[in-house]
Amino acid sequence: MGKHDSIWWLTLGGGNFVYIGAYLKNLSETESLIDYIKKEALMLNPSFGIILPSPTNLPDKIENILIPLDRQIISSLSGDSRKTIADIADEVGVAAKTIRRRLSAMISKGLLEFSIQWYPDASNDIITVLHIRLKPEADNTTVAHIMERYFPNLLFHYRFINVPNELFCIIWTNTMKELRGLQQRLADENVVASIVSNILYTGYIFDTWRDGLVQEKDAPLSKN
């Protein structure tokens, strides 16, 4: 899977489940990605969900290009996203005020996101995927408010545009008892129809075409 230029994340869970995350330049690449996964992972009929970037109103042409300074900033942060603006300014050789302005611009346009590389087997905590089937009347705003109540156990959650009643959540707990209690609380929410849980046990992170954009001079960052 790591040989594909779009696949950035893969993790294995119970029940012989394989979860794969990919960044596509545009939605037209969906079919070729699925064909690749079918062939290389020997999956006959993989399920897939599509998540659009946020914000989705990114500029289409010249405004969507990272300038050389932007690339230097991203490169500086690539190994440590918690690095201070002062440290970035020293490394890049420009004023901290300029770094702050460029960072704010990239974040506001959805050109930059901060994350960590985490693996299910990196600690003694229990990392679990919850496949939540939502009731048809569940709206995004209500679901978002409900999910806020489950932080910090809830690491992140996604709702797919092509599977509107499915919610994909990844949570961490210290014990199986804590996991059981959290799952029961979620099952009692009035927007939830059913929950299926699956514990993750190992994972992998890969570089993609997005990482290459930092080195490519004035390469456009795709809208999708």
Image (cartoon, helix red, strand yellow):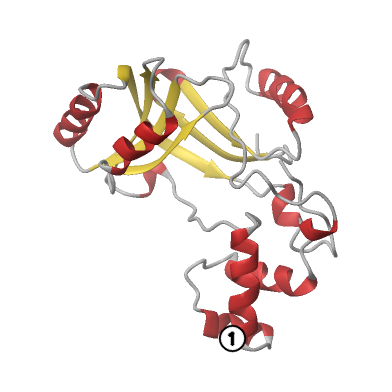
Determine whether, in the image, residue 216 is placed left or right of residue 189: right
- The percent coordinates of residue 182 (x first, y second) are 20, 33
Within-10-Å neighbours for mark 1: few <14, some 14–19, many 20+:
some
Side (left or right) of 181 relative to 96: left
**Who's the residue at 38% across and 49% down the image?**
122
Q: Quadrant of the N terminus?
A: top right
Counting from the top left corner in percent of width and height, residue 4 is at: 72, 37
Horizontal side of residue 47 vs 129, given as left or right: right
Rendered image quadrant of residue 223 = top right
In the image, residue 193 sits, relative to residue 76, either above or below, namely: above
Residue located at (47% from left, 69% from top)? 82
| SS state under label 1 | helix
Image mark count: 1
Q: Quadrant of residue 74?
A: bottom right
Looking at the image, which residue is at 56% across and 56% down? 113
Q: Quadrant of the C terminus?
A: top right
Quick check: 47 left or right of 111? left
Q: Is residue 213 above or below residue 67?
A: above
**Residue 38 lies in what quarter of the image?**
top right
* Picture layout, residue 11 above or below residue 208: above
Q: Which residue is mark 1?
A: 96
- Image coords of residue 135 (percent x, y): 36, 16
Towards the viewer: 67 or 2: 67
Task: Please tell me whether residue 187 is drawn above or below residue 149 in the rendered image.
Answer: above
The kind of residue on which mark 1 rests is: Ala
Front position in the image: 173 or 132: 132
Q: Residue furthest top?
A: 44
Residue 167 image position (x, y, % from top left): 42, 26
